[in-house]
Amino acid sequence: MSSRHVSGRKSKEQSYRQLANVELEAPRPPPPLASICLVFETEASTISAANNHRQQIVDKLRASDLLVTENVLADRKEAYVLISASEKRLQQVADLMGLKLRLLLRDMDSGQLEKQEGAWTPFQQHLAGLYEHSSEGGLFSSNQQLRILEYILADEDERAMGPQLIAKEKVELGNSALDQLVKNKVIKNFFHMHNALRRDDLVKRWVFDWTGRQPIEDIREYFGEKIALYFVWLGFYTSMLWIPAICGTFLIISQIVSYSLTGSMDNPWVPLYCCFMSVWSIVLSVGWKRLEKSYQYEWDTLEFEETEEERKEFIQSEHTTARLIAYKGTYEGGGG
């Protein structure tokens, strides 16, 4: 036997020993799916399926490949229907929406994954393995799952194969499909369900932790960029307030001393403090603009512009809205 074959066999044996010594990671349980809850009023459990609005809606939801769980509370005369979607269904609709996810990024030297460092790009289902998973364990965070569910229920795109809970022409201006069902008293109410594990983790690491930094990235994943950016601002503003607070404390002490000596609280430190506050306000404004742009760049929201939406009550009032301009998607206000 040649020396090449012997060395090759030894190297294979060494690699097998290394694999045998590797401790395999225990399989993780699948992450909980985000859900939207519909609340129905039920007076009796013997109502036939044909005349039961709840059963009709549940059938439509299941026909659109959504996961539906029903819970009936006889003592409260209410039924709760939880709506969620499988990972495959979420991926299909996320591809239609162009939902942006982070790409996986590996260190060139070590080959290890670098979390929260990849670029944002629209999701494509056939490239699902190239995207970074959320910290909740799944490909999509709770917030993203709820956005996808809302997109499906709204029937905004026929390719999403939504349940068509109500005909679009029957949905009043300013209402979503679920809003219209509530107004028509088909359902009593609807709301988004919390991810209990994620919520409890945020309460522990964020609400009750007064010494550590805010888990901004986790807040963004769970609540979205808009809410996360608000708490970035709140943390920055609170931190910057320490400077005028300390200087203001010394100013109050100087005023007390001045009043005890001269009977007046005026002293040379007052105008100096006013000048200092003018400079501090400029530093605060410039510092926040830089911090805001850095987070917008990191989260790929530089082109995001919030459009103000009129209240449903204003749009639907006969005194403020006369007719819909179809070609613009807007409306003209009527006379009061």
Image (cartoon, rainbow, N blue to C red):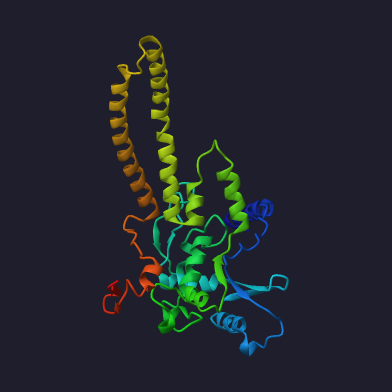
Q: Give the x, y percent position of residue 155.
A: 45, 78
Q: Which corner quadrant holds the C terminus?
A: bottom left
The single residue placed furthest to the front in the displayed view is 336
Residue nearer the viewer, 71 or 322: 322
Q: In this view, does 15 lie above or below 74?
A: above
Q: Which corner quadrant holds the N terminus?
A: bottom right
Q: Position of 104 compared to 271: left or right? A: right
Q: Quadrant of residue 95?
A: bottom left
Q: Is residue 333 above or below residue 49?
A: above
The single residue placed furthest to the top in the displayed view is 261
State the residue at coordinates (43%, 35%): 239
Residue nearer the viewer, 199 or 109: 199
The single residue placed furthest to the bottom in the displayed view is 50
State the residue at coordinates (57%, 40%): 209
Q: Give the x, y percent position of residue 323.
A: 30, 78
Q: Give the x, y percent position of residue 42.
A: 66, 78
State the residue at coordinates (51%, 51%): 218
Q: Position of 162 compared to 330: left or right? A: right
Residue 114 visible in the snapshot: no
State the residue at coordinates (29%, 79%): 326
Q: Position of 273 compared to 99: left or right? A: left
Total number of numbered discs in the rendering: 0
Residue 220 visible in the snapshot: yes
Q: Give the x, y percent position of residue 161.
A: 48, 81
Residue nearer the viewer, 313 or 275: 313
